[in-house]
Amino acid sequence: MDQLSQTHYHVAILPGPGMGHLIPLIEFAKRLVNDNKFHVTCIIPTIGSPTKSAKEALQGLPTAIDVVYLPPVTFDDDDDLPSPYQKAVTKPETLVFLAVTRSLSPLREVLKSLKATSNLVGLVVDDFGTDAFDIAKELDISTYIFFTSSAMMLFFSLGLPQLDERVSGEYRDMAEPVRIPGCVPIHGRDLLDPLQDRSDMAYKLMLHHAKRFALADGIILNSFVEFEEEATLALPKKPPIYPVGPLVRTGLTNPVDDGSDKYYNSLKWLDRQPGGSVLFVSFGSGGTLSYPQLNELASGLEMSEQRFLWVVRSPNDKSSNASFFSDQNGNDPSVFLPSGFVERTKTRSLVVSFWAPQAQVLAHGSTGGFLTHCGWNSILESVVHGVPLIAWPLYAEQKMNAIMLTESTKVALRPEFGENGLVGRAEIARIVKSLMESDEGKRLRDRMTYLKNAAAKALGEDGSSTKALSALASNFKRRACMS
């Protein structure tokens, strides 16, 4: 045991492009370094140049975490792709899958160098990166998946190959819902976006990676037992699964350029608001609304007469994830809001463009609710800070997350869409007032407070997530002694 404790163990992590994958893997690296005395190299594939947000997320890391950028992958004028890819590359999931696949050659060189110069004991990829397992096997490195979504989504992913064989048509046309052990039933139309068209390359790539999950030495889950108890306990035992969450951003270095003003202005404005009175409205780093929906949301927030802090992004009538790979730093999106909106609501609102310090906003005592796109990182940050939700899913697996939040964990309200495909202003006003003022909103808040305390306990010294991370670290070390 003394030999184990004195050896400097090294782990490589490979997040797929996109902030939703980078952030939790960086937080996982911090826990490995700070709690278990590992050294970590974060190997980052990129689509084009790294975004400003990604660079900021990698500032101020512990000295035991190194960052290596792989050569950027581009898809412009890509004539060598087979024809099925031509349409598929518009999907973020497809771009992420292909970016990792096209980075395998430089990844091999980085891993070979780390293997030769350090005590490299493992490679951790996210759920888009299982093609890297073949390289790890060549180099005799143990392989793990860091799963960036819920236990429910993990269970579904593990069972996707069997579902693919059992169902012949489109999942959205199934008469019966998909039943996931320990979870609420999910109708096919509510399954994640890449599964809505089985002829699409995004689906085929997701199925390919789901089949490779069983090759991992273990799966690291960014959730915790007390949050998804039934689903977590129902998960299969092989490969072993380590629920180590919630791993979320606990703080950011000061943003640069205009972000610095937004950082301080948002928090100073919150300082002047009554406790628990503000609804935070943000659709994450990638989410966008159509122009008509943006206007309905603005009008609904105004009609609600509630305080709100709204992160506004420019609308996009074609895609709900138009900002997935960009910082969207263009024209001021407030020009798309209804005429006079900012002036009429200025005594009880703050409208900021593109970005706000979400972790700090949710941690602030004046924040009493969060209208969110239901990205998993945003959900976990809300749980950690005890903030109840309005669930407004946009893309990826967010509909599945919204169903879990409203029907299983019961910490969110969800607005209803009208026949025109929009959430109307009256419905928005109704649900905002319900969350912030009604007895139902208070019940959600009490439930979130319970989960906040459970999350803190899970991450505590003897908590379930701390124990799971310790078991994972021991397995890394044990594998090193065997090789």
Image (cartoon, helix red, strand yellow):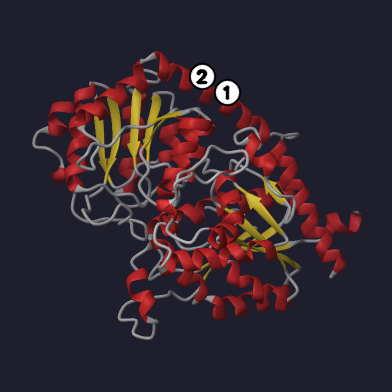
Would residue 59 be seen by someone viewing this image from the given angle? no
Q: Give me the disc on residue 450.
A: 1
Q: Is residue 321 positioned above or below 350 on the image?
A: below
Q: Amino acid at mark 2?
A: Asp
Q: Secondary structure at mark 1?
A: helix
Q: Quadrant of residue 308?
A: top left
Q: Is residue 176 positioned above or below 7 on the image?
A: above
Question: Position of 296 compared to 457: left or right?
Answer: left
Farthest residue to the bottom: give it.
80
Most foreground residue, 29 or 189: 189
Q: Which quadrant would the C terminus be assigned to in this image?
A: bottom right
Q: Give me the disc on residue 446.
A: 2
The residue that appears at 35% across and 16% down in the rendered structure is 437
Q: Mark 1, residues whose alpha carbon is within 10 Å: few (<14), some, or many (≥20)?
A: some
Question: Position of 154 compared to 241: left or right?
Answer: left
Q: Which quadrant would the N terminus be assigned to in this image?
A: bottom right
Most foreground residue, 333 or 235: 235
Query: Residue 60 location, x and y as percent?
Result: 52, 52
Q: Secondary structure at mark 2?
A: helix
Farthest residue to the left: give it.
339
Question: Position of 301 compared to 399: left or right?
Answer: left
Is there a contact, CB below 8 Å, between mark 2 and mark 1? yes
Query: Residue 458 location, x and y as percent?
Result: 67, 34
Query: Residue 357 location, x and y as percent?
Result: 39, 41
Q: Amino acid at mark 1?
A: Tyr
Would residue 403 be seen by someone viewing this image from the given angle? yes
- Give the CA separation, mark 2 to mark 1: 6 Å
Query: Residue 20 location, x and y as percent?
Result: 47, 52
